[in-house]
Image (cartoon, rainbow, N blue to C red):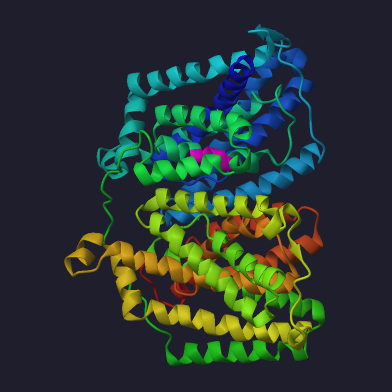
């Protein structure tokens, strides 16, 4: 019993830092609607800056002064980024702000490596909290007791700020209805800046306070951001009290999961999040958002390719088919990978642009396709062509199961439920060693003899990817595609003409998942192996970046975005050790230059606009 009490207290200590970061993200999203992937980077920078200040300026600032000043410095950086970058794209589709913050995350990782180096940094102990206290006969770090007290204190201060000040009233009002707040004459720019600065300060403070507990590394941002999103969604977007309760729940699940449920400890948090979202879609204390007052759009609707563009596409396909006669083996391997990710991005783009369904876990179906093909070969001795059928079949089944639950939600709650299911699939692949090989993966999955050369495998990939993308485009302009777009644009009007939203979106979810699985099956044979990373969050984020970079208000943006993003990633990796910094800077520059994506900008220059 004593051990479990100490474990419970350790969970509460972890909950304090998690709450600080989560409350900041919850406040930012509640007002600005920014899905801020860079929030974990601010947490990491808070820890790094605190390390530098407490080590080099400890005499002038002291330990606690260094902690607070570090959070203030990072908050100032966040305010500058909001004013210089995010303000420029507030009028762009909201997901493009996600793309910008993802670029900042990439840049922050390599900047931390450049400034502080690759080694883990160990901070000093907190003055006055260097020892341990006796808790029912067991030692417990006194600093953890301090953190347990910090969480409720910050919650109280935030409560007073939001309930007892005019600024807090405006923030709460903007969380419910931004348009009405603007109609009352409130300067939204400075309100957004102040909210963003407060959120970044809390994230940086959470990172700085971790200095005595753990080493500072350049991977801290990725470790924390997923749990932060989970906490924010479970608690309810924009609800600080909900974030506090959810942070305790998640931290205690992490503390006890490995003891009580060791076989599912990796996915326990995501199982709970999925359960909460299915039972209470708005989170524990979340409320429905105010009605959206969208302005009427004068943009023309999508239309199929005209004759000249169709000829250009045919010419591009013919040139692609002739590539093996001019390129070497390495170039063909890269070209095959580009084609595979063009199909992967096109499947996600179909879901986002045609249906307005933003998935944060689309890699689940790419990975299921990879494992479906690999298991067919390894466990059943299937030939390659049969495996290329088995992969999409497994992806289709996964999309059928997961999609049935996901389409009952909408907005960011839909997105987070897709993330939860993706993490569940990843955990199964990671822990089911007998079938999936676990972390070691499945190896030796090379193409069959008739496509064993890079040129032949490239032709096979081209022969499968081009028709698959063509089918997706045909679906967009089919009666089913029009129905899918109708339920995206207006659920009330579509219901009035007899269109049932959930079955249509479920079918579309399955279509997108099946084509993503085909891409995953091809990827297995292009690499000769499959690992749990094929289902991981980074691959899902990459898919989002590809789609957003190309332009979500277009029909073909995902294809162009995948081509640009993967080509840049591969080239930069070969050219510099700081490829993430360069790629992140390029993404941010492209977002500012082309707020509607690359294809959207091209169509705008051509005088043709597309409807969201």
Query: Is 608 left, or right, of 492 in this rendering?
Result: right
Residue at 43% x, 65% y is 509
Residue 53 x, y percent position in the rendering? 73, 23
Q: Give 55 or 255, whichever is nearer the viewer.
A: 255
Q: Give 173 or 417, whichever is nearer the viewer.
A: 417
Is 140 rendered above or below residue 590? Answer: above
Residue 238 x, y percent position in the rendering? 40, 36
Residue at 54% x, 40% y is 268
Q: Quadrant of the C terminus?
A: bottom left
Residue located farthest toward the left when viewing the structure as drawn: 496
Magenta stretch: includes residue 15: no
Query: Is 119 left, or right, of 96 in this rendering?
Result: right
Q: Quadrant of the N terminus?
A: top right
Magenta stretch: includes residue 227: yes
Q: To which quarter of the image does residue 568 belong? A: bottom right
The stretch of residues the image draws in magenta is: 225-230
**Count of number-bearing discs:** 0
């Amino acid at each position: 019993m004593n051990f479990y009490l100490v474990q419970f207290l350790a969970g509460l200590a972890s909950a304090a830092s998690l709450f600080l970061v989560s409350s900041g993200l919850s406040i930012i999203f509640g007002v600005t609607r920014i899905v801020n992937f860079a929030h974990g980077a601010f947490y990491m920078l808070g820890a790094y800056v605190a390390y530098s200040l407490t080590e080099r300026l400890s005499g002038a600032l002291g330990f606690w002064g260094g902690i607070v000043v570090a959070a203030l410095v990072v908050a100032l950086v966040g305010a500058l980024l909001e004013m210089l970058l995010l303000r420029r794209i507030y009028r762009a589709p909201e997901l493009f702000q996600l793309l910008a913050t993802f670029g900042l995350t990439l840049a922050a990782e390599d900047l931390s490596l450049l400034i502080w180096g690759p080694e883990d940094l160990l901070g000093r102990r907190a003055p006055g909290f260097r020892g341990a206290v006796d808790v029912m006969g067991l030692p417990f770090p006194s600093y953890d007791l301090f953190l347990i007290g910090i969480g409720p204190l910050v919650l109280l201060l935030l409560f007073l700020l939001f309930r007892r000040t005019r600024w807090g009233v405006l923030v709460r009002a903007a969380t419910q209805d931004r348009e009405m707040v603007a109609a009352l004459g409130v300067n939204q720019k400075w309100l957004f800046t102040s909210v963003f600065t407060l959120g970044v300060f809390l994230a940086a403070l959470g990172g700085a306070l971790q200095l005595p507990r753990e080493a500072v590394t350049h991977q801290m941002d990725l470790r924390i951001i997923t749990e932060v999103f989970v906490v924010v969604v479970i608690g309810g977007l924009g609800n600080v009290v909900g974030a506090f309760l959810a942070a305790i729940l998640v931290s205690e699940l992490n503390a006890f999961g490995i003891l009580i449920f060791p076989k599912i400890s990796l996915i326990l948090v995501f199982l709970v999040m999925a359960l909460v979202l299915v039972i209470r879609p708005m989170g524990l204390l979340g409320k429905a958002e105010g009605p959206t007052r969208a302005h009427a759009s004068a943009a023309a609707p999508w239309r199929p390719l005209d004759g000249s563009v169709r000829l250009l596409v045919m010419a591009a396909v013919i040139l692609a088919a002739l590539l093996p006669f001019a390129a070497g083996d390495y170039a063909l391997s890269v070209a095959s990978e580009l084609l595979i990710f063009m199909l992967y991005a096109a499947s996600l783009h179909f879901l986002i642009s045609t249906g307005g369904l933003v998935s944060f876990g689309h890699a689940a179906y790419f990975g299921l396709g990879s494992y479906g093909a690999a298991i067919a070969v390894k466990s059943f001795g299937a030939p390659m062509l049969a495996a290329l059928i088995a992969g999409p079949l497994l992806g289709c089944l996964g999309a059928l199961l997961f999609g049935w639950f996901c389409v009952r939600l909408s907005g960011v709650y839909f997105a987070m439920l897709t993330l939860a299911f993706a993490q569940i699939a990843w955990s199964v692949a990671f822990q089911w060693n007998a079938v999936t090989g676990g972390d070691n993966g499945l190896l030796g999955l090379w193409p069959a003899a008739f496509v064993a050369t890079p040129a032949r495998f490239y032709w096979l990939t081209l022969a499968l990817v081009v028709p698959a993308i063509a089918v997706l485009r045909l679906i967009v302009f089919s009666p089913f595609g029009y129905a899918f777009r109708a339920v995206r644009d207006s659920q009330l009007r579509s219901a009035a003409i007899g269109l049932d939203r959930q079955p249509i979106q479920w079918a579309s979810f399955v279509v997108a998942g099946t084509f993503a699985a085909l891409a995953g099956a091809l990827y297995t044979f292009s690499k000769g192996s499959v690992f749990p990373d094929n289902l991981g969050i980074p691959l899902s984020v990459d898919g989002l970046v590809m789609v957003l970079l190309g332009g979500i208000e277009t029909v073909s943006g995902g294809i162009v975005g995948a081509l640009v993003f993967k080509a840049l990633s591969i080239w930069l990796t070969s050219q510099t050790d700081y490829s993430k910094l360069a790629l992140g800077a390029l993404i941010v520059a492209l977002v500012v230059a082309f707020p509607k994506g690359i294809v959207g900008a091209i169509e705008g220059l051509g005088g043709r606009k597309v409807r969201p």
